Image (cartoon, grey):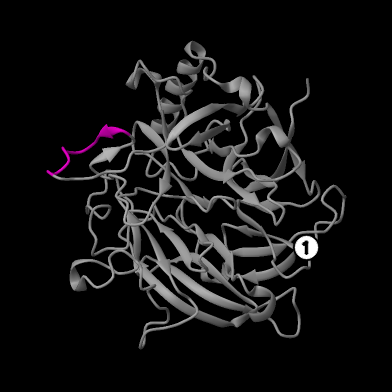
């Protein structure tokens, strides 16, 4: 039975199968991405928590309170505390930190509980932030919660403070990455609201928060607004012409983004429409071109005079036939990751990791001053095996990276990266 990728957008099973066949046919012609792959290590995925059954894992993080607790978010609406023994065979008792399933955030394929972020001062204030979807009307919700004063392993459900609700017209392209930057502000990615080709032109509309990355000060508020817009946000002060929350725009569905813990650069992978997937470095006031461009390529119409679109760091095609000069192996649905700054895999340090949800391939690249210096496939599913659908990456306090995969329609696995067997 075909498994429809989570973040491909609106697609029928038949269309997905046709596109998947195109990709696999292309892989037979272009078996791998050539170039500087030798400079990067070959990796494998090793499952962790083998006895724990999780449902569509989309986020993993370590509580910044010194406890070492690892928490995992399931798309249907639950945040779990994982067992301390990652290799053990504990019973499948689920330790629930927060449960939003009764609100039914997960209806359509791309909806649900999508993002979690701990406050930088979580150790003292117990605050964390959750991004989830709601219905009737459809909307994206950003809320603040506080951990229970009586039990550090439980959130206080009744502490919820809704910071922001953003209406969207369709059930896909929800975005959902929620992270604190090195400046202490909260960054949130929002998709263009769904539907093919951005029919409402949200990506280029500065009066809408859809198709944007926004930046908020959650430690203050302005009047009745439960947050403050940082005074150096680029579009603050333009009145009704632009929303002051916007940090960057022109994005289709920036599902996952991350800060390089060494350089502070903000990396984001943006899912393409029909032809190209892309990786971007996000800068203040940057316009990344959607829906006038897809990757480096013109999309729906020519760019308006004076448009200053920021090029992606890299792109890859759904089919190499789209550009005979491409050297990147194809895929269908990009998942953004992290720049590796851990210690377990020295050959990987400084490389940005990203993956394709549909094919399970994981790539890495290094870049300096806007130029890619090394790039290649780090992990390719073994021939004859079903690909692990990479839904998200994760990073712990030491900079080690994890991979969250879907196994079929519901179950999921948390994996660690290890050197490939020689």
Crowding around mark 1 (Cα neighbors within 10 Å: few <14, some 14 to 19, many 20+) is few
Magenta residues: mostly which secondary structure? loop
The residue that appears at 78% across and 67% down in the rendered structure is: 67
> Which residue occupies the extreme front position in the image?
369
- Residue 228 sits above or below residue 51 on the image: below
Q: Nearer the viewer, residue 249 or 16?
A: 249
- Residue 160 sits above or below residue 259 on the image: below
Q: Nearer the viewer, residue 352 or 52?
A: 352
The answer to whether 251 appears left or right of 381 in the picture is: left
> Which residue occupies the extreme top position in the image?
29
> Which residue occupies the extreme left position in the image?
305
Bounds of the magenta segment: 296-305
| Residue 333: percent from left, percent from top | 46, 37
Residue 1 shows in this picture: no
| Residue 259: percent from left, percent from top | 53, 53
The residue that appears at 54% across and 18% down in the rendered structure is: 32
**Residue highlighted by disc 1:** 68
- Residue 205 sits above or below residue 233 on the image: above
The residue that appears at 23% across and 45% down in the rendered structure is: 308
| Residue 38: percent from left, percent from top | 62, 20
Magenta-drawn stretch contains 171: no
């Amino acid at each position: 039975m075909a498994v429809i990728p989570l973040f491909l957008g609106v697609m029928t099973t038949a269309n997905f199968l046709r596109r998947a066949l195109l990709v696999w046919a292309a892989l037979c012609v272009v078996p791998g991405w050539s170039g500087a792959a030798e400079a990067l290590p070959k990796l494998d995925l090793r499952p962790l928590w083998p006895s724990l059954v999780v449902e569509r894992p989309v986020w993993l993080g370590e509580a910044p309170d010194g406890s070492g607790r690892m928490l995992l978010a399931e798309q249907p609406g639950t945040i779990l505390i994982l067992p301390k023994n990652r290799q053990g065979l504990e019973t499948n008792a689920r330790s629930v930190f927060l449960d939003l399933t009764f609100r039914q955030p997960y209806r359509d394929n791309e909806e649900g509980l999508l993002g979690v972020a701990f406050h930088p001062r979580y150790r003292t204030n117990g605050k964390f932030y959750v991004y989830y979807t709601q219905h009737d009307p459809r909307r994206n919700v950003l809320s603040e919660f506080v951990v229970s004063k009586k039990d550090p392993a439980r959130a206080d459900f009744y502490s919820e403070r809704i910071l922001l609700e953003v209406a969207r017209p369709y059930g896909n392209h929800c975005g959902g990455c929620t992270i604190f930057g090195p400046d202490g502000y909260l960054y949130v990615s929002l998709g263009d609201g769904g539907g093919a080709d951005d029919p409402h032109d949200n990506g280029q509309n500065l009066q809408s928060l859809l198709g944007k990355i926004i930046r908020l000060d959650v430690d203050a508020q302005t009047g009745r607004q439960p947050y403050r817009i940082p005074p150096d946000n680029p579009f603050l002060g333009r009145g009704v012409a632009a929303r002051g929350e916007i940090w960057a725009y022109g994005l289709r569905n920036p599902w996952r983004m991350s800060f390089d813990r060494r350089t502070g650069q903000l990396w984001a992978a943006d899912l393409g429409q029909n032809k190209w997937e892309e990786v971007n470095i996000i800068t203040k006031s940057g316009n990344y071109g959607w829906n006038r461009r897809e990757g480096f390529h013109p999309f729906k119409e020519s760019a308006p005079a004076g448009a200053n679109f920021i090029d992606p760091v890299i792109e890859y095609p759904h089919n190499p036939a789209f550009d005979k000069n491409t050297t990147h192996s194809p895929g269908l649905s990009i998942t953004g990751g992290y720049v590796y700054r851990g210690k377990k895999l020295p050959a990987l340090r400084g490389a940005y990791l990203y993956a394709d949800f549909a094919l399970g391939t994981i790539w890495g690249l290094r870049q300096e001053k806007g130029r890619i210096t090394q790039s290649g496939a780090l992990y390719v599913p073994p021939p004859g095996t079903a690909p692990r659908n990479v839904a998200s990456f994760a990073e712990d306090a030491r900079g080690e990276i994890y991979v969250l995969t879907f196994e079929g329609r519901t179950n999921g696995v948390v994996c660690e990266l290890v050197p490939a067997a020689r």
